[in-house]
Amino acid sequence: MNYRTPTKAIITDAGSASRYLPITKTIPKAMLPIGAKPIMQLVIEECVEAGIKEIILVVTPEGKSIYENYFNDAAVKTKKQLRSQGKLERYEPVQAVLDLPKITIIEQDPSYPYGNGSPVASARQFIEDDEAFIVAYSDDIVFGQSAVKDLISIHQAHPDAAAIIAGQPVPHEEIKKYASISMNGDKLVGLIEKPSPDEAPTDLASYGRYLLTPEVFEYLKPHDTGLDNELWTADAIAKLIDTDRVYVVETSGQWMTTGDPKNYFLAHLKYALSCPEYGDEIYKMLDQCQQKAGKLHC
């Protein structure tokens, strides 16, 4: 069957984020800032740029109230104060958050095991049987062309697709952190979750941008666990390969992960360097540090 073009996106931040402790003891990982916005907002804005009209955030019980406050609280007291100071333009970023498309915030179903497939399965009730939908992991941000837009473009050419996944090459030694993609033309023929470099068929990594259909939910059940007894989205997609309707798009934007502190800092630096307000000053600082220490390279 042909599936309707996606208008909904499931975005997940339901993990424990233990690599970020102690800060994630009280703040969800995707609420850490990149510039003056949280990571989650950047992911949502990428979806909106691609035409997505409805967002379903799947989060932890502890994080639910934080997300609800951020996306729904109009900060009336702050607005009043800014107006009295003649600085009402500073409220514009808050209004931009309030003007985002419909955002529904739910907790991950506790009956599911740990794993990145569980928050996706938890949002099943929001997806109609005849519609494709986007899944985005809030660990991943994309600079430049929206990866979601790339996925939807491929779907327009293949509306019968069971799934479409985004991929980008990674250094050979890094492929063990991701799912390795095998392709025949533009079709997926293999997807191995976190292989050793010796076992990986390619260095093309699947990352947290997918266009999926309700077919995937057949393989996202609590008993469908894989590596480390976790429920993996990649495993479910791999089970759809036999349909011969799973496609791959090597996205044109630059994907960077924020899944650990080192890569978060690198992504934040990339964002800062691209900002016209202060990018040049950061380049100058890095150049000065390099001259003094001989260790930093832009």
Image (spheres, rainbow, N blue to C red):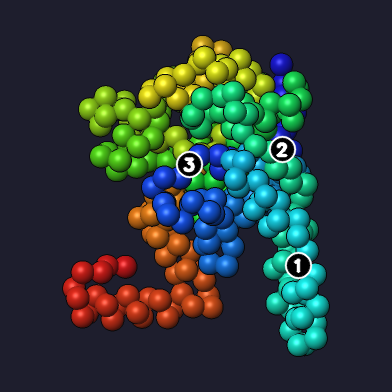
Percent across and percent down for residue 247 are 53, 26
In this view, 195 is above or below 89: above
Left or right: residue 134 compared with residue 197? right
Q: Which residue is mark 2?
A: 8
Mark 3 or mark 1, earlier in chain: 3
Percent across and percent down for residue 176 are 31, 34
Q: Look at the image and tell me whether residue 15 can be seen.
A: yes
Q: Residues within 10 Å of mark 3 (few under 14, many from 20)?
A: some
Give the amino acid at mark 2: Lys
- Residue at 75% x, 81% y is 82
Disc 2, disc 1: CB below 8 Å?
A: no
Give the amino acid at mark 3: Ser
User: Quarter of the image holding residue 74?
Assistant: bottom right
Q: Which residue is mark 3?
A: 16
Between the residue at mark 2 and the residue at mark 3, the CA separation in whole angstroms equals 25 Å
Give the amino acid at mark 1: Ala
Q: Which residue is mark 1?
A: 75
